[in-house]
Image (tube, helix red, strand yellow):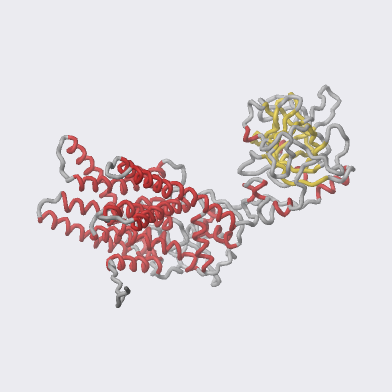
Amino acid sequence: MLHLPLVVTAQVDLVLLLVSLLAMWTRLSHLSYPNAVVFDEVYYGQFVSLYMKRVFFIDDSGPPLGHMILALGAYLGGFDGNFVWNRIGAEYPSSVSVWSLRLLPALCGALCVPLVYLLTLELKFSHLSALAAALLLLLENALIVQSRFMLLESVLIFFVLLAFFSYLRFHNALSRLEQPSATCSWFRFSWLLLSGASCAAAVGVKYMGLFSYLLLLGLASLHTWTLIGDQTVSHLSVCVQCVCRVVCLVVVPVLLYVFWFYVHLSLLNHSGPHDQLMSSAFQATLQGGLSRITQGQPLEVAYGSQVTLRSSASQPIPCWLHSHKVNYPIRYENGRGSSHQQQVTCYPFKDVNNWWIIKDPSRQELVVSSPPRPVRHGDVIQLVHGMTSRFLNSHDVAAPMSPHAQEVSAYIDFNISMPTQNLWRVEVSNRDSESEVWKTILSEARFVHVNTSAVLKLSGVSLPDWGFRQLEVVAEKLFKAHSSSLGWTVEEHRYGTSEEQKEREAELHSPTHIDVDRKISFWAKFLELQAQIHLLGNPVSWGLGHLCLLAYQLLAALYLLRRRRGFKDLPEGVWHQFVYLGCVCIGGWLVNFVPFLLMEKTLFLYHYLPALCYLYLLTPALLEHAHNHLLRTASQRCTVCVCVTAGALSIFLSYQNFCPLTYGSPELSGNQLQSLKWRDTWDILYRRH
């Protein structure tokens, strides 16, 4: 029977609500100011514009999820991608919704504050410690700056914190339930699923998220090992829980990580500036660019086909097999002699001299017959240079820059004792059968010199000025050559119809050619300052966090030494809580800090922010531990409370002091800016009006 009235009882944590509102206010207020490109917005904005135009690109710095999140904010604001991200400080036009471009990073940064509050509670510390941790994040100037612009650090930190909170919520849920039902059990595993998804998102935003993910996996492994040793749990339950953990924390993150790339490639289906970094087969799937050239061209390579051959080893800059009417010098700089025949190189630009004709050695024709006779794996062919009609040749003469390999040339008959050796056997390396047909774009072929069994390959060495700094092509014995440098792909292809050389040259000139796009780095313009925005942390909270980092390590060492001697200063439950705190906070700090010490790259302050968040988790928890278990008298506790209050007030005053640098408002004079330099080593730049 339905009983009226229907009553809903809800518990609202007013402190959590308050810090959430304050976080929204500090991160989202006046988000459109300054109305100009700030710092790395010039970098990420390029990718956002490419997403809006669905143009393919590659960003070597990380996976695509972070860019897609930024692009989502731009899409919601109606951004069409028509803005030139060419310099820091460039004014946004009125047609660009600056607020929407910065919305999602700001929202993620704001949500980090309540997440830290909840995470501290899941670590089983008091609400007061949770509030202190939230306030440390709330008043951290550097985190506010990173959150208020179109940057990715706040997004990364949000997903990392969400992953740890969800996992601890899952782990602690069972202890809260005296008689867990099946529904509660499955609801508990939804937290584990959310944790796995958050780990995938963290890695998908930046590869630095991988280290936090590995830390979480290590923590989960310890908990699972404890579960396996629990004799009160049935064998079936242990197996089910282990499988669920593997699925949620390993399988789901891997699948989601792959899914981010699937979405990325599905969205970006137009030719763009980074096409040439990809294989010919990949380029052919994009609209425009290479696909515009190759659309409708024959699939099967036949005798008489006119082709361009791209080296599979030419990464990241592509190059094509090439020849021109210039011979190798009679003698090289080191005194070695050459064949003095026509040069064969690999040229990193589209050019009419990249065209070659596939010839049947038993026939004279250089046109495709009707019906076409396809070239198959194992067939012996000749390669004729389209513009000079010279045959691709190799012989027992040392290559110019790689003397251990054979020279490759376009043969010229000088009526000397150097006969032609221009037969090449086609081997399709990715064939499905021994009679595989050589296909355009799809097949990766090797060319084996019939006379010497050497394989045509790109050495990767640049020729001197006499070779126009083009790349050396050699023939090398198969057992010496690396397989990755041997492949060649037919990129452009058509059936030749002209027998006469003049007509053939005109035919070879007719295809549309695309130049390789060269982009100039935006970092070259990183000399102009904008809007007096500075990435500066809160010095007081940074100092307190690092002091607590040192204090925890000293205290842990003291505890371990005394426990080794048989003194147990803490109850077992408190000791496990202390160790657990170190695993999460000290471990999180280490995995987000140590890798940067090993990287040979320019480091910025924002690289340290994920590690800093773990110190802000540690600080109030360690103070609570000291208050409850180390301080013996009321006077000691009173003294610590006064010091903590003074510290909190100092953190707020420091935050307020540096607010003009954090928000760029109000504008300060040069003298006022210089007064904010607490140390001579700080560089505060300002623009004079």
Pick the front one: 85 or 212: 212
Is 2 left, or right, of 204 in this rendering? left
Name the quadrant of the N terminus: bottom left
In the rendered view, does 607 fall on the left or right side of 412?
A: left
Residue 318: image quadrant is top right
Q: Residue at x 52, y 58 (%)?
A: 68
Give the total of numbered labels.
0
Q: Position of residue 578 (x, y in %)?
A: 24, 47
Picture residue at 74% right of the left edge, 43% below the top: 308
Q: Out of 259 and 671, give the one closest to the viewer.
A: 259
Work out whether residue 359 or residue 141 is closer to the camera in this orientation and state it. 359
| Residue closest to the eye, 7 or 598 | 7
Q: Is residue 542 left or right of residue 54?
A: left
Q: Position of residue 305 (x, y in %)?
A: 80, 42
The furthest residue to the right: 500
Where 309 falls versus 166 (above or below)? above
Q: Position of residue 582 (x, y in %)?
A: 28, 46
Residue in the picture at 68% in, 42% down: 319
Task: Residue 127: tell me if it is visible.
Answer: yes
Identify the residue at the far bottom of this view: 5
